[in-house]
Amino acid sequence: MTAVQLKGVRKDFGSFTAISNVDLEIESGELVALLGPSGCGKTTTLRMIAGLEVPSAGQICFDGQDVSEVTVQKRNVGMVFQRYALFPHMTVEKNVMFGLRVRGTDKAETEARLEEMLDVVQLRQFRHRFPAQLSGGQMQRVAIARTLITKPSVLMMDEPLANLDTKLRGEMRRFIRDLQQRLGITTIFVTHDQIEAMELADRVAVIFDGDLAQYDAPDALYKHPNSIEIADFMGATNVFEAKILGAGSTPQAEASFGTLSFDARATDGPGHVMLRAEAIDLHLAAPNSGQNVISGTVTARDFFGANITYSVACGGETIQVTEQSRRMVDIGQDVWLTIAPDRIWIIQNTR
Ligand SMILES: Nc1ncnc2c1ncn2[C@@H]1O[C@H](COP(=O)(O)OP(=O)(O)OP(=O)(O)O)[C@@H](O)[C@H]1O
Ligand SMILES: [Mg+2]
């Protein structure tokens, strides 16, 4: 398997800079998601790694070797696209074998690998069907098999699940995750869906406007975003302006709804305090202990089956609190919120 490195990579299209100075290390056998809004440069990054686009500056290395002089074919990367690009007039098995046919791989080897691939993607019983006779998920599996049969050293997937419905997307994510772990193939997966990125990836590279904004494991990214833009993109609902007193031995954040003690490292100055909705406890009576208690009134209730999210008006702000739906608290009810100091995250421009 192959480690992939981007060192100071930039890509200009005329006077427009699509990617500026990106450093990114993908370990051998790792599954990395490139996550970011439309137009941020995800596909451009993939195309440079594949050799379909030449960087304007910087280096791309496979296992430490600069590949700028290496052609697309020799880089041995496999690409799976959003629109599966299957050949409509070929059966499943002809589609899957295609890459080996054009390489002139001998017949016995081709057939052996075909059988292996049909097992891997569980499409043995569909081998004689044409693409039009398959479901979206099955077509996507054919596209994956067609790529994997060539034994790429890096697998790249550009929004491969975007055309599928929610349930099928979930199934395909698990399928891709299992397959990737079984084969141990270095994989780069492009998506603009933060849930998909967190569920699939070992590490997530968040790209905003052609810049690598943060590169972290999913839980680190979710709990410890390094800017309010990333917090927002990752779906954080409770991010509030606060005066941060972080330098002393008892760090505190002064927000409009009260002063909170926290455990994270911070400096003195303006900033934001982030409270994850599921990390807050909601009480119907004032708690005995005095630390990190915020009083408020329930103004709305959203029922999601397993969970309920309450909107609680607290000192001019609305704090969202998510809890398991074991009880229903009424709208208009006065409540007290508590949060442990180690579950508070502070975002400051300089840290
Ligand atoms: N060949 C090109 N010439 C000029 N500009 C380009 C070219 N290819 C991409 N761009 C621009 O570069 C930026 C990044 O494009 P890219 O396709 O990488 O975005 P993306 O993150 O994949 O977006 P999406 O999620 O919509 O697929 C966009 O502003 C796009 O218009
Ligand atoms: Mg794209």
Image: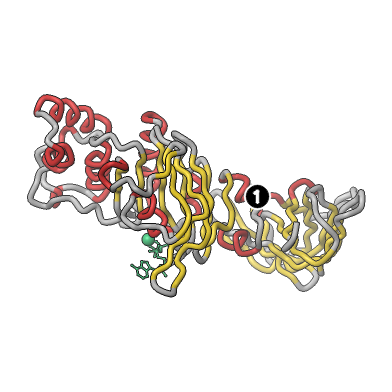
- The residue at 41%/46% (across/down) is 188
- Please tell me whether residue 173 is drawn above or below residue 159 in the rendered image: above
Q: Is residue 144 left or right of residue 251?
A: left
**Front residue of 243 and 214:** 214
Q: Is residue 93 left or right of residue 274?
A: left
**Front residue of 304 and 263:** 263
| Residue 190 visible to the viewer | yes
Residue extending furthest front? 69
Q: State how the image is colored.
A: secondary structure
Where in the figure is residue 32, as x and y percent of width and height?
47, 44
**Front residue of 170 and 349:** 349
Q: Which residue is mark 1?
A: 223
Ligand number 1: quarter of image: bottom left
- The residue at 41%/58% (across/down) is 55
Label 1, residues with CA under 10 Å away: few <14, some 14-19, many ≥20: some
Where in the figure is residue 290, as x and y percent of width and height?
90, 52
- The residue at 21%/53% (across/down) is 85
Which quadrant of the structure image shows residue 175? top left
- Amino acid carrying mark 1 in the image: Lys
- The residue at 58%/61% (across/down) is 302
Q: Quadrant of the C terminus?
A: bottom right
Where in the figure is residue 216, as x and y percent of width and height?
58, 46
- Please tell me whether residue 64 is drawn above or below residue 22 in the rendered image: above
Q: Secondary structure at mark 1?
A: helix
**Front residue of 236 and 348:** 348
Q: Is residue 323 left or right of residue 164?
A: right
| Residue 126 visible to the viewer | no
Q: Is residue 52 left or right of residue 96?
A: right
Q: Quadrant of the N terminus?
A: top left
Where in the figure is residue 17, as x and y percent of width and height?
46, 69
